[in-house]
Every structure is written in structure tokens, then in C-alpha cells.
Image (cartoon, rainbow, N blue to C red):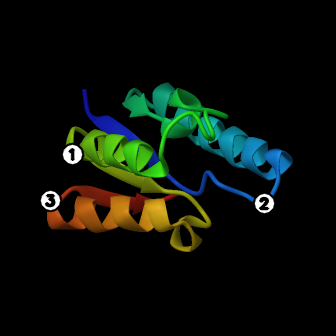
Amino acid sequence: MQIVFICGPYRARTVFGRLLNIYRARKEAIRFWKMGFAVICPHSNSALFDGKCRDEIFLEGCLEMVRRSDIIALMPGWSVSSGAQEERKLAIKLKKKVIRV
């Protein structure tokens, strides 16, 4: 079974914006689960953990999840997210399949 990593913006100016990003990522995750993939959705994994540890720890964790994934699914808005940009860059370096959703 292939593993899909959901890659998209998490941070936003407001809590509502973050919740909207989480909702959108979860919606994509469900879609991939229904297609028979195993899915890593970091938005759900650490939803609203803001301020619990340094941002660098979350980014390093997400980069490790990219390393363990087969496919990286780029959500709309990924290009304005510094974290998603790093995740995509690593996926390309590791020759992972990168798709847009």
C-alpha cells in the first residue's frame, strides 16, 4: 500500500484560518483513504498544537514523514507555505511522486 503525504498550508492569521486549512487537508486525506492509500495528514496529527514546541520541530517531523511517504499531494496554496515549500523540495530531491490536488 502506498503512503500519501498531504502537503499544504497550515498556518493562517486567525484560528479560523488554521481550522479551515485543517479541514481542507482532512478532506483530501479522506479522499485518498477512500482510494485505498495510507495517508499522512500532518494537519490532523498536530492540529492546534501552536506554541507547544518550536516550529522547527514540527517542520523536521514533517520532513521525516515526507521521507517515509511514496506520494506527496500538493494542496492549493502550498506555494505560499514555507513548510510546504520545504516538503516539496525534499520530495523532489528524493524522487518522490509529487501530484497536485
Q: Quadrant of the N terminus?
A: top left
Q: Amino acid at mark 3?
A: Leu
Residue in front for this viewpoint, 38 or 57: 57
Distance from Cα at disc 2 to Cα at disc 3: 32 Å
Residue located beneath label 3 in the image: 94
User: Which disc, if any, is residue 67?
Assistant: 1
Q: Amino acid at mark 1?
A: Arg
Residue located beneath label 2 in the image: 13
Q: Amino acid at mark 2?
A: Arg
Q: Residue at x 54, y 65 (%)?
A: 78
Query: Considering only order in the chain, which callout, 3 or 1, is on the residue closer to the N terminus?
Result: 1
Residue in front for this viewpoint, 37 or 7: 7
Residue in front for this viewpoint, 85 or 40: 85
Q: Residue furthest bottom?
A: 79
> How dense is the environment of label 1, judged by Cα within 10 Å: few (below 14), some, or many (20 and up)?
some
Distance from Cα at disc 2 to Cα at disc 1: 29 Å
Query: Residue 22 placed where, x, y %?
Result: 67, 41
Query: Residue 19 placed where, x, y %?
Result: 76, 41
Distance from Cα at disc 1 to Cα at disc 3: 8 Å
Q: Residue at x 58, y 73 (%)?
A: 80
Query: Residue 69 placed where, x, y %?
Result: 26, 41
State whether residue 89 is above or below residue 58: below
Q: Residue at x 57, y 33 (%)?
A: 52
Are the residues tagged 1 and 3 within 8 Å (C-beta)? Answer: yes
